[in-house]
Amino acid sequence: MNVSPNSKPPVCRIMNYGKYKYAQAKKEKESKKKQKTINVKEIRMTPKIEEHDLSVKAKNACKFLEDGDRVKVVIRFRGRELGHMDVGRDVLMKFAEMTSEYSVIDKQPKAEGRNMIMFLSPQKQH
């Protein structure tokens, strides 16, 4: 029921509330259909990763990025590897270079405890 409070005398429209609720739900469903949910996929590796393993992970990341998902790349440092964070950063930058055709670096590599994390997001289509 809509009321127009400023008019003299007050005017209101009597309406079918069930029909109104149905129309609202339908409109909301239509707007949700156009939205795209963005998932974050995680790829884990170590600083000592071999060339082929890195390329396989990069290929998987490219698939995720083509689907419109963001990719979180994590390097896990164990034991003495913690003293060589620069090696991990180099691996992450190489990974970003391998996926550069499909991705843009969203967040630069950052060390958090035993992990170094970098986020990649899909490139905008022209």
Image (spheres, rainbow, N blue to C red):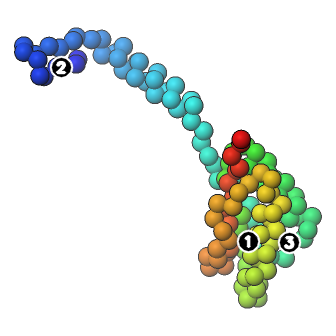
Q: Which residue is mark 3?
A: 49
Rendered image quadrant of residue 111: bottom right
Res. 95 image quadrant: bottom right
Q: Which residue is located at x 80 percent, y 57 percent?
A: 99
Q: Please say whether residue 21 is visible from this viewpoint.
A: yes
Disc 2 residue crowd, few under 14, some 14–19, many 20+, Cα 10 Å = few
Q: Are marks 3 and 2 in contact (CB under 8 Å)?
A: no
Q: Which residue is mark 1?
A: 75
How busy is the neighbourhood of tag 3: few (under 14 within 10 Å), some, or many (20 plus)?
few
Determine whether label 1 and label 3 are within 8 Å by CB. no
Question: Which amino acid is tagged 2?
Answer: Val
Foreground mark, 3 or 2, reads 2
Quadrant in the rendering for residue 88? bottom right
- Residue 20 at what x, y percent from top left? 35, 17
Q: Which badge, 1 or 3, is on the more N-terminal residue?
A: 3
Q: Which mark is residue 108?
A: none
Q: Is residue 86 above or below residue 119?
A: below
Q: Nearer the viewer, residue 78 or 98?
A: 98
Question: Residue 26, relative to residue 115: is it above or below?
Answer: above
Residue 36, placed above or below residue 76: above
Which part of the image, by quadrant, shows the N terminus?
Answer: top left
SS label for mark 2: strand
What is the spatial separation of the Cα atoms under label 1 and label 2, in whole angstroms? 61 Å
Q: Residue at x 82, y 68 (%)?
A: 94
| Quadrant of the drawing holding the C terminus | top right
Element under disc 1: strand
Kind of residue at disc 3: Ile
Horizontally, residue 7 falls left or right of residue 59, namely left
Q: Nearer the viewer, mark 1 or mark 2?
A: 2
Give the labeled residue for mark 2: 3
The three-letter amino acid code for the residue at tag 1 is Ile
Q: CA distance from mark 3 to mark 2?
A: 68 Å
